[in-house]
Amino acid sequence: MNEASELINKLKKYYKVGTSQELGEQIGVAKTTISGWKQRNSVNAIRRKIYELGLPIDLDRSSTSIDDDINEIYSLIIDNAAYTAKQKLVWKLDNDIVTALNAYFAKDILKEVINDLASDKDKYTPENMKDAFLERLKGVEAGIKTKKVILLSQLLERYFSKLEVYALVHYPEIVFDYAGYFGQSKFEK
């Protein structure tokens, strides 16, 4: 495979498209232009287009294949953690109608803690996110919510890995994308 083909594959991966036609539509060139780039190994033309579009694509050939592999593995691990967290929430909070009602009322607490942590989520790693989450959860002003805070704390401590809690805060749109007893996600209003 020539270097132009590698760059075109990176562009396809970036835009999440499979064909040259779809890629051409995304970057504003004809499909034949992309074919020509491949045939002539027009690396400079592709690089100019990447710079023109301001894309965050690493053009250093020597390090990209390893970096891409690492990023892909990391992405798969995070996706798996988000999916597992989602399944655990469904399994634990949708067992019966009483639990579902408690989960519905606990959603505000959970959202509050997630939003609080998400505001500076970049300072947390998968290693320390769970502890930070549990600390924030315990610090929530309880009042009538005390049982809900305890329920959520126990749920996270017992059933969620550090990486799953990390995914919960960093990717809530994936974790909370499921329908429950109320016909919509219990974690959305």
Image: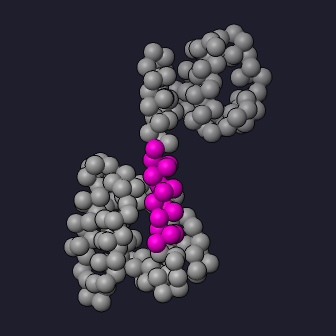
The reply to whether residue 169 is visible in this rendering is: no
- Residue at 55% x, 20% y: name it: 47
Q: Is residue 87 magenta?
A: yes
| Quarter of the image where the N terminus is located | top right
Q: Is residue 11 left or right of residue 56?
A: right
Above-or-below relation of 4 to 97:
above
Q: Position of residue 113 (x, y in %)?
A: 32, 68
Q: From the viewer's perspective, is residue 59 above or below residue 114?
A: above
> Which residue is at 49% across, 22% downward?
65
Q: Main secondary structure of the magenta part?
A: helix
Q: Which of 118/29 is in front? A: 118
**63 left or right, relative to 32:** left
Rendered location of residue 2, percent (x, y):
62, 12
- Span shown in magenta: 77-92
Q: Position of residue 120 (x, y in %)?
A: 29, 55
- Reply above or below: 161 against 188: above
Residue 110 vertical position relative to residue 162 in the rendered view, above or below: below
Q: Report the residue at 45% width, 47% height from top.
A: 78
* Labels in figure, total: 0
Residue 140 horizontal/vertical position (percent)? 25, 76
Decide if residue 29 is in sight here: yes
**Which residue is at the far top?**
40
* Residue at the (42%, 76%) spot, across then down: 107
